[in-house]
Image (tube, helix red, strand yellow):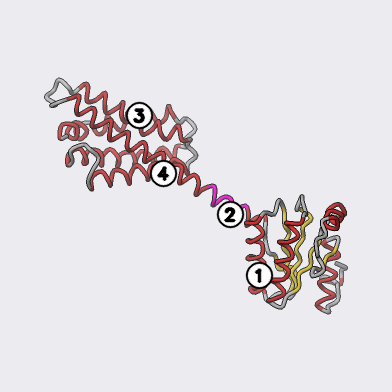
Amino acid sequence: MHGVGQILLQNRAGVLDAWLAHLRDAAPAARPASLQLLKLELGTLVEKLTAYFLASDGEGAGAAFRTLEEQAATISAACARDGLTPMETATLILALKAIAGGLLNREAGNGITEPDQARAALDAAVDKLALITFATFVETREEIIKRQGRALLDLATPALPIWRHIILMPLVGIIDTQRARQVMEWLLEALAREEAHIAILDVTGVPVIDSRVALHLTKTVEAARLLGSRVIVTGISPDAAQTLVKLDVDLSSMITRGTLRAGLAEAFRLLGENARGPAGTML
């Protein structure tokens, strides 16, 4: 479809300006910096679309269209990272159909051959780009959500060296199977990294201590024991203690203390050190 390619080549600036104007109307929340980046990326997409129609038969095959697909995917990923919605992103790509299609209609009387076929080829190419854009947007958003989830887990499960040979891991929130596995992994890594002999697991911020959570804690204690370290579990509430007794959960392998303060005292006792902080203050 050399006619489509020639028209896009001759009117590239007008197509791009109309496209950016549509973007500002369709996504008013987009940041100015994001609009500047999108202007460059959309300009590249127009160039690649022009090259595709100059070099191909308009059916979406070949190397020319693959580069076009890659650019559309790049734009979609950028939109996802910048906070645009799926509707705004899809509308952005589909707007090219109306903008370039209107241009073809205006040029229909200026020597373009088979205008209906040219418009159909343009619509087919943009529709395929829209599908690619949506798929990439979903993949990017899922990756962002996973990355944010990992960041939240990192924040919710820190391993803090609080004394020589003692680390503290305060747990906050619900402990499911995935998080329990990460707790064990990060605790063992911290024990080895800090050469710690004692780890304190504080579960004051865990809303529910049931048999499943207790099983995860038991496995963590046993894994730490294999490294030659001891684990003290603190913060089990009276209600949680009654629940665990009713469930007949075996916690005989655990060292438990009611409060973090009591857990620290036990940790110093196990180390054989005086349970006093700097300048002789009581811990």
User: Element type at marker 1?
Assistant: helix
Report the amino acid beneath label 1: Leu
Mark sitting earlier along the chain (1/3):
3
Mark sitting earlier along the chain (1/2):
2
Q: Specify whether residue 164 is in view.
A: no
**Residue to which mark 2 is pinned:** 150
User: Element type at marker 4?
Assistant: helix
Distance from disc 4 to disc 1, alpha carbons, whole Å, reads 37 Å
Q: Nearer the viewer's eye, disc 1 or disc 3?
A: 1
User: Element type at marker 2?
Assistant: helix
Mark sitting earlier along the chain (4/1):
4
Mark sitting earlier along the chain (4/3):
3
What stretch of residues is rendered in magenta? 145-152
- Whether residues under marks 1 and 3 lie with C-beta atoms below 8 angstroms apart, the answer is no
Report the amino acid beneath label 2: Arg
**Residue to which mark 3 is pinned:** 95
Residue 13 versus residue 251 in the image, above or below = above
| The one of 144 and 179 positioned closer to us in this rendering | 179
Give residue 188's mark.
1
Q: Quadrant of residue 18?
A: top left
